[in-house]
Amino acid sequence: MKKFTADYVFTVDGKTPIPNGLVVTDDEGRILSVSSYNDDNDKSIIHHKGIIVPGFINSHCHLELSHLKGKIEEKEGLPNFIKKVLALRNVSEKEIITAMKEADKLMEKNGIVAVGDISNTSISADIKAQSNIKYHTFIEMVGIDPDIADELVEKADAMKSEFANAGSVSITLHAAYTLSKNLLKNFRKYCKTHKNLISIHNQENDDENALYRYKTGAFVDFYKDLGINIDHFVAMSKNTLQALVPLFPQNQNILLVHNTFTSLKDVYMLKRFDHGFYWCFCPGANLYIENTLPHFDFFTKSELPATLGTDSLASNKTLSILEEMKIVKNSRPEISFETMLQWATLNGAKFFGWEGELGSIEKGKKPGLNLITNFKDGHITDKSEVVKLI
């Protein structure tokens, strides 16, 4: 057995934090018991200053872009960021693999036990298969050309077999501005016959809304610069979320990622649909690319669960869920630590269907344990660090 104690244990299972908490696990990390600790004579226990929480769930990452760390300028907006990714991502396979391995180890060091990862190729499959982290891979389809919709779905579905030993896998859409109605139609048909978790970049940039409302904005110039014809695209006089939600598959969990320019009207509109929607926030990337953050207060009024992600090292300085929590805390100090911890752990586990093992400290589970230091007055501080205990 292993015994872990701290000032408090946050179990994230609906119970209040346990003062002088004691977590006992077997040698493989499975929880045997959770209780208060009162025996100062037990020399087998080392008391940690800080709080013990479950391992973190990183609901949105791009492992394939790890080699782009520090290579793209900050705060230049999403269209320019995408152009730089397209221009810089094709380097040697060795460089990409080395960077992905380092990113995987960085996430493990930062207490992340599971990741939802976006992939455009199968290059990350072996790393995921050998990792201590649990992965779900979203094979991403990108294509605004309606004539290639069938091909995109067929290729994405065929790629799933290459991740057979790398955790769970599904196919997904990239974003509203990189899909056609044909692709959305074919994808919806596919989801009727496949269990298929969905993740889509949502309203990360306000030009996405401008494209769908008026067919104006930076994405019109973006496609012109790339030589891609979008004459077929018809503005819908609505924000992207309002335009697309009625067309989304209805029998799958759907992760809406970023939501930086999601309006309160968009948030309330989702109440009319029973699609298994989850929000995912990646505040570090939002500041890196757009230098702005979502209106978190909009989403705390929503009945939909929220999660946290790191995005990629192309758009972030590190891969740490704790650092994402710090940004939220400094932006909206009224959001409680318990709420953010739910975003960082159990909500993500529920989205991916991992809550039987991960997301909360409960007897029989194997969620991983993190120690967070410098916890003061019920909240993390800028000096807080995460130490992976198990």
Image: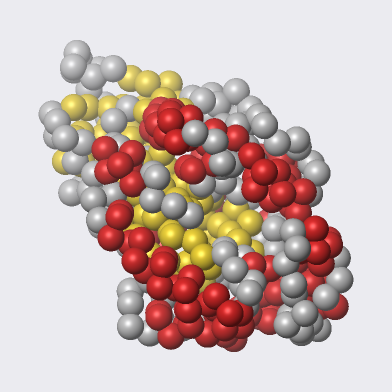
The residue at the far front in this view is: 227
In depth, the one of 222 and 131 nearer the eye is 222
**Residue 196 located left or right of residue 305:** left
Q: Is residue 194 above or below residue 364?
A: below
Where, quadrant-wise, is the N terminus in this rendering? top left
* Rendering quarter of residue 323: top right
Percent of width and height locating residue 21:
32, 33
Residue at the (14%, 31%) spot, across then down: 27
Percent of width and height locating residue 326:
62, 37
Q: Is residue 70 above or below residue 244?
A: above
Q: Is residue 207 above or below residue 67?
A: below
Residue at the (77%, 79%) spot, across then down: 231
Residue 383 in view: yes
Percent of width and height locating residue 142:
57, 64
* Rendering quarter of residue 202: bottom right
In depth, the one of 356 and 93 nearer the eye is 93
Q: Is residue 115 above or below residue 28?
A: below
Residue at the (67%, 43%) spot, across then down: 87
In depth, the one of 113 and 299 nearer the eye is 113
Percent of width and height locating residue 93:
45, 36
Where, quadrant-wise, is the C terminus in this rendering? top left
Residue at the (40%, 45%) spot, across then down: 123
The color scheme shown is: secondary structure
The number of numbered badges drawn on the structure is 0
**Residue 325 located left or right of residue 269:** left
Residue 320 in view: no
